[in-house]
Amino acid sequence: MPANKKVFVLPGDGIGPEVVGEVRRIIDWMDKRRHVSFDLSEGLVGGSAIDAHGTPLKDETLADAMAADAVLFGSVGGPKWEKIPFEIQPERGLLRLRKEMDLFANLRPAMVFDALADASSLKKELVAGLNIMILRELTGGVYFGEPRGIETLPDGRRRGINTQVYTTDEVQRVARVGFELAQKRDNRLMSVEKANVMESGLMWREEVTKIGAEEYPDVALNHMYADNCAMQLVRAPKQFDVIVTDNLFGDILSDCAAMLTGSLGMLPSASLGAEDPTTGTRKALYEPVHGSAPDIAGQGKANPLAQILSFAMLLRYSFDMGEDADMVEKAVDNVLNAGFRTGDIMTPGGKLVSTEQMGSALLAEMDKLAA
Ligand code: IPM
Ligand code: MG
């Protein structure tokens, strides 16, 4: 079979290379067992790129990411690079990728696997069966708004500035993705902002309401303030289906939702651009919600499942390989049911395994599922 599925791999820093390594094993497995080959290439991003080239993202690397069908991203950052100038810190590499690839729609599904309902910090009955989708706007808002910076005032005080700013088209396009996701799920959309305090939030609410009434009257749309949403996520998380929110609130609320599922180590994400009208494809980057976890990097302790589930999203959204994605997700469910646990999701009676052992257990399940 021709290798036409171009995947650009950016393992990054910390545990990134370890967890991405487990995905590479799945890719090899798919090559051998399912005759699906990927055209893989790899690049440097974040701290590892700073060490090699003095910048967290080279222009060439960005060009490779743009040319790929999908980017599989690990994680960036760590204490080693904390002291370097802000403009070239590891995170800037990821933010530049998101911005330049125009990956405005960030899908962060929070699902509780039955076997992990006990690993959640909430009572089991509150989270068992939880399946919500947080849709985070990813290329606008305070993350990129101008003016920004740190300035020194005439009297010597310093002033730090960031700007929360959205235009109607930015709100409309992410809202449409939210409505469309809801239509494929339980048909409910919760739009989250702070319209009581911020004009940008008020405009957001008005635009989402308008799109809903004009284009998606069948979807049940509701609105919530972000602080209330944080509270509701820990009070009664199952009330939500799809949540659409801005860049900063989405960052915060998705970490919160992640913990409901037992561990940050379980949450995948997909960052998608607009559909190309001629090819029907989208630029896309897949990354776990967790960070580079420098404290456990290189020790074989990291949970590879969020990265593996991000790969399942890649199969589903970039290559329309829903069956294969289902199989990977089923294999994750099975290894958890069989009791395999990395430290972050350890539950009483669980079998503590390393990153690589978790990968091996997963491949064994894939073998069974493919038999
Ligand atoms: C995330 C991360 C990033 C963000 C960091 C690493 C820049 O926290 O993807 O949620 O703030 O967006
Ligand atoms: Mg975050």
Image: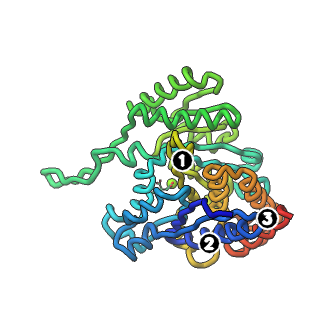
Would residue 306 appear left or right of 357 to someone viewing this image? Answer: left
The reply to whether residue 98 is in sight is yes
Helix or strand or loop: what does disc 3 sit on?
helix
The local crowd at label 3, few if under 14, some if 14 to 19, many if 20 or more residues have their Cα within 10 Å, is: many
Q: Which residue: 55% across, 44% down?
A: 279
Residue 294, percent from left and from top: 52, 71
Which residue in the protein does label 2 denote?
A: 21
Q: Are marks 3 and 2 in contact (CB under 8 Å)?
A: no
Residue 93, percent from left and from top: 41, 61
Q: Which residue occupies the foreground of this view, 178 or 206?
A: 178
Residue type marked 2: Gly
Could you tell me which quadrant the C terminus lies in? bottom right
Residue type marked 3: Met
The local crowd at label 1, few if under 14, some if 14 to 19, many if 20 or more residues have their Cα within 10 Å, is: some
Residue type marked 1: Arg
Residue sitting at the far bottom: 299
Give the spatial CA distance, label 2 vs label 1.
Answer: 25 Å
Which residue in the protein does label 3 denote?
A: 366
Q: Quadrant of residue 233?
A: top right
Would residue 51 appear left or right of 322 to someone viewing this image? Answer: left
The local crowd at label 2, few if under 14, some if 14 to 19, many if 20 or more residues have their Cα within 10 Å, is: many
* Mark found first going from the N terminus, 1 or 3: 1
Residue 303, percent from left and from top: 65, 67
Would residue 45 appear left or right of 369 to someone viewing this image? Answer: left
Which residue in the protein does label 1 denote?
A: 282
Give the spatial CA distance, label 1 vs label 3.
Answer: 28 Å
Give the spatial CA distance, label 3 vs label 2.
Answer: 17 Å
Helix or strand or loop: what does disc 2 sit on?
helix
